[in-house]
Image: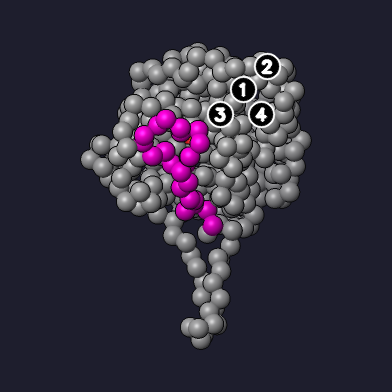
Amino acid sequence: MVRIRWRYLIGDPETTVRFHDSMISLVGNTPLVRLNSVTQGIQATVLAKVEYFNPGGSVKDRIAVRMIEAAEQSGALKPGGTIVEPTSGNTGVGLAIVAQQKGYKCIFVCPDKVSTDKINVLRAYGAEVVVCPTAVDPEHPDSYYNVSDRLVRETPGAWKPDQYSNPNNPRSHYETTGPELWEQTEGKITHFVAGVGTGGTISGTGRYLKEASDGKVRIVGADPEGSVYSGGSGRPYLVEGVGEDFWPTAYDQDVTDEIVAVSDKDSFQMTRRLAKEEGLLVGGSCGMAVVAALKVAEGLGPDDVVVVLLPDSGRGYLSKIFNDEWMADYGFLEEAGPSARVSDVL
Ligand code: PMP
């Protein structure tokens, strides 16, 4: 578990000054907050683990710390080395902060559909961003995948974390998110709900909670309709950061008891309700996970404690989910459709 490293300065115990070593020691130990409004009619306690309190604003700071520390220990990342990863989102921000603090360079490869705001955030932390055309085949030398592979080959001291296959992605959650939830709920957690992207969050946290509870905590994955985890073929959906069109090795299918598929419309409507009713300005995958959590909580009693993990903040989605015109263009402002569908784990 990553411990908060407080520093105590100046000898006299009555006048000590408490501070953190650096932004890195602020990663993790995020709060739990009860959902009070969207849970009306539900007897169980539903608690949100609010990951935007991490310094980079998302759950991905946790994996950035662990993946970089492990690469330092194994020698894959050497002093002055360069981190190369095809990412435009939360993982990039986490890696950029940790890299900057530890003196590594970062090169991120992004498709050209990524907003300039997101690219500018990465550049603000000192990262280099290489933008690739979306309208070319994956085999094309300028494609997103080929460019990042070439940069790894050609950059001296380059290291590619690859969050989809890096075991330190789920391990970071096994070592931090899981123990935090067990301690925060004093072992009373009965259900854990999280969206599945790389699968790192649900696999690592879920495995810890299963072990700590002798298999009693139920682990529920939330997935956008159309993604492979809930039986789809990878058909496009608009919720960002979750769902896949392939099965990453970071995802451990054995940990998940149930997958709930949620539509874009239900996800985004719930995301807006979380801001308006709970004071939680969070991203679309958070709304999706809450729809799944409420579906699970519906049938539960007053002793049940459902924890739903909210990966990031809503600030990155102001021109989409929180923009009425964008929502109306997709028909997402109309009344909600049929509620979430529960499917067996594949
Ligand atoms: N939501 C958002 C916004 C994300 O960026 C991610 C990470 N891809 C997830 C959910 C899913 O987390 P994981 O990759 O650990 O499954």
Q: Could you tell me the amino acid type at mark 3?
A: Met
Q: Which mark is residue 238?
A: 1
* Picture layout, residue 276 above or below residue 15: above
Q: How is the image coloured?
A: one colour
For label 2, the crowd category at 10 Å Cα-Cα, with few meaning under 14, some 14 to 19 and many 20 or more, is: few
Lower sequence index among marks 2 and 1: 1
Give amino acid for label 2.
Answer: Tyr
Residue of label 4: 321
Q: Percent position (x, y) of residue 247?
A: 45, 23
Dot 2 or dot 4, earlier in sequence: 4
How many numbered dots are placed on residues in this image?
4
As drawn, the label of residue 270 is 3
Mark 3 or 2: the one toward you:
3
Q: Characterize the local packing of mark 1: few (<14), some (14-19) or many (20 or more) Cα atoms within 10 angstroms.
A: some
Distance from disc 3 to disc 2, alpha carbons, whole Å, reads 16 Å
Give the side of residue 323 with respect to residue 176, left or right.
right
- Dot 3 falls on a residue whose secondary structure is helix
Work out whether residue 152 can be spotted: no
Whether the residues at callouts 3 and 2 have beta carbons within 8 Å, the answer is no
Q: Main secondary structure of the magenta part?
A: loop
Q: Are marks 2 and 1 in contact (CB under 8 Å)?
A: yes
Q: Residue at x 54, y 15 (%)?
A: 337
Which residues are the magenta region? Answer: 26-48
Between tags 3 and 4, which lies in front? Answer: 3
Q: Nearer the viewer, mark 1 or mark 4?
A: 4
Q: Residue 32 appears at what percent x and percent y?
A: 46, 47
In front here: 57 or 87?
57
Residue 330, label in figure:
2
Residue type highlighted by circle 4? Ile
> Label 2 to label 4, Cα distance in Å?
11 Å
Q: Is residue 50 magenta?
A: no
Considering only order in the chain, which callout, 4 or 1, is on the residue closer to the N terminus? 1
